Image: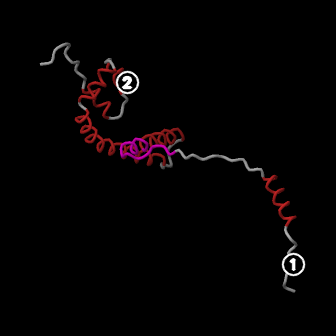
Amino acid sequence: MRRGRPRKQIPVSVIEAVAAGVSVPVAAREANIPEKTVRDYLTRHAAELGDLRQVKAPELMGAFHDLAFRAFERTMDPQANLVDMRNASIVMGVATDKLQLLSGQPTQIVAGLHAHRVDLAGIAAKLARVAEQLPEVVDAEP
């Protein structure tokens, strides 16, 4: 038997929110529960929550896939006004991002591109100096 204070019960809504991807601080704040209490609970029940995530992921992927497709269809509607098309594009982007997140794909690709300034005038001057040092080429054909 456990001694001391009884463990605080965590509402199912908090567990579902965290399993769906809501951050622990946000879920705890919305339920008015200390963040440490939620983290302790999640640590004790990590295996069960992993199973819940696996069950929820396919359902959420289906819902986001449907949402993205419907938003895409809305953007292709010739009678949609610009505001509707803009809103549908935003919804489509968010749904696509969530689909990638749920399927374990990257949601952002950051390439380490470095921009180098090229001094074209300096390069041309170097080429001219090198060309002056080359022997004159004579065309061997008449």
Please name the amino acid that badge 1 sits on: Val
Q: Quadrant of residue 68?
A: top left
Dividing the picture into quadrants, the one containing residue 3 is top left
Q: Tell me the kind of residue under disc 2.
A: Pro
- Residue range (magenta): 96-109
Q: At 33% from the left edge and 44% from the top edge, which residue is drawn?
A: 61
Q: Quadrant of the N terminus?
A: top left
For disc 1, the neighbor class at 10 Å (few under 14, some 14 to 19, many from 20) is few
Residue 134 point in image, percent of width and height: 84, 68
Secondary structure of the residue carrying tag 1 is loop
Q: Residues within 10 Å of mark 2 (few under 14, many from 20)?
A: some
Is residue 11 magenta-colored?
no
Q: Residue at x 79, y 55 (%)?
A: 123
Between 105 and 122, the one nearer to me in the picture: 122
Count every numbered label the image shows and give the total: 2
> Farthest bottom residue?
142
| Mark 2 or 1: the one toward you | 1
Q: Position of residue 27 (x, y in %)?
A: 34, 25
Quarter the C terminus occupies: bottom right
Q: Quadrant of residue 9?
A: top left
Please state which of residues 85 and 69 is positioned toward the viewer in this rendering: 69
Residue 138: numbered disc: 1
Return the x and y of residue 92 as percentages of the image width and height: 45, 43
Q: Are marks 2 and 1 in contact (CB under 8 Å)?
A: no
> Horizontally, is 126 left or right of 27 in the view?
right
Q: Seen in the image, is 32 located left or right of residue 4?
A: right
**Residue 25: assigned label:** 2
Residue at 30% across / 34% down in the picture? 19
